[in-house]
Image (tube, rainbow, N blue to C red):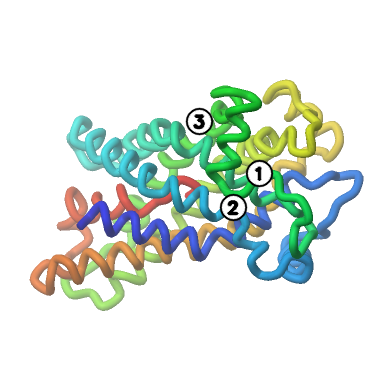
Amino acid sequence: MDFLAGCIGGAAGVLVGHPFDTVKVRLQVQSVAKPLYRGTFHCFQSIVRQESAFGLYKGIGSPMMGLTFINAIVFGVQGNTMRLLGNDTPMNQFLAGAAAGAIQCVICCPMELAKTRMQLQGTGEKKSSRKLYKNSLDCLARIYNREGLRGVNRGMVTTLIRETPGFGVYFLAYDVLTRSLGCEPDDRYMIPKLLFSGGMAGIASWLSTYPVDVIKSRLQADGVGGVNQYSSIADCVRQSVRREGYMVFTRGLTSTLLRAFPVNATTFATVTLILMYSRGVEEGPQDCESVQPSHQAQLQQQAQPSSL
């Protein structure tokens, strides 16, 4: 039931946050010479006007498909790492989260590659006249046929650089916040405190790794339309900074932060409610400090999807 709660919570988070993710990707990879969007809200308006509301959900199949595997990896690795480390301390939470983030990249990288390609497909068109990819699986299959395993894992290094510290910061921030806020037995505000902690932890994790995410998105979008611009991570960084300055590393940050809080809040709310109802009233809300090693640690392990 714990694993199921994490999967359902993650799915709820994806449904809430995917439109913001679509906006983020569009802003990160748009041409500086001929920009389509002036900013976050203009991008939202343009997608809805030109492609309908469904345009905001392009590529959602990929994160939905990868969600179960990612939660399974994060749950197993984070829990086992915490048991190996022994003490439930903020630093151990960081190390366990970093380990989970690194290993789940095996699923996360191909999933985000398909998501990015699907999100960019038919940009500015309400009904695409020519679709290169039918769905996320077809996208990965076509990339594999053209470029092999290396193509499917395009952006793996940047994904690893982003996810490892990102998950570490997430679990560290969530642990520190829940300890600082504290909860009393039968505290009526326990769930809002958990939601606030999860939302703020998500924001902290994105701020810590966002420049890497910009480069990852550009590398994974490179080759769309048959033209490759970047030969390596360093080349992508050099070209991006030369053309757009250092502010390039903040492209799409507004939509990302707008997405981070509700995604994590939705995820934690769903997980908490499912666990409360499944375990019954006798195992309902408890003191946060008393459940830190077990129940709350399980919530932390399960509740965070790959994109934070």
The amino acid at mark 1 is Arg
The residue at the far right in this view is: 33
The earlier-in-sequence mark between 3 and 2 is 2
The amino acid at mark 3 is Leu
Which residue is under mark 1? 117
Which residue is under mark 3? 160
- Residue 30, x across and y down, in percent: 79, 47
Q: Which of the numbered marks, if any, corresponds to residue 308?
A: none
Q: Where is residue 286, by image quadrant? A: bottom left
Q: Where is residue 143, by image quadrant? A: top right
- Residue mark closest to the camera, 3 vs 1: 1
Q: Is residue 9 left or right of residue 46?
A: left
- Residue 243, x across and y down, in percent: 86, 36
Which residue is under mark 2? 59
Secondary structure type for disc 3: helix
Q: Is residue 200 left or right of residue 270?
A: right
* In the rendered image, the vertical position of residue 94 relative to residue 235, given as above or below: below
The amino acid at mark 2 is Gly
- Residue 259, x across and y down, in percent: 56, 60
Secondary structure type for disc 1: helix
* Circles 2, 1 touching at the beta carbon (< 8 Å): yes
Secondary structure type for disc 2: loop
Q: Residues within 10 Å of mark 2 (few under 14, many from 20)?
A: many
- Residue mark closest to the camera, 3 vs 2: 2
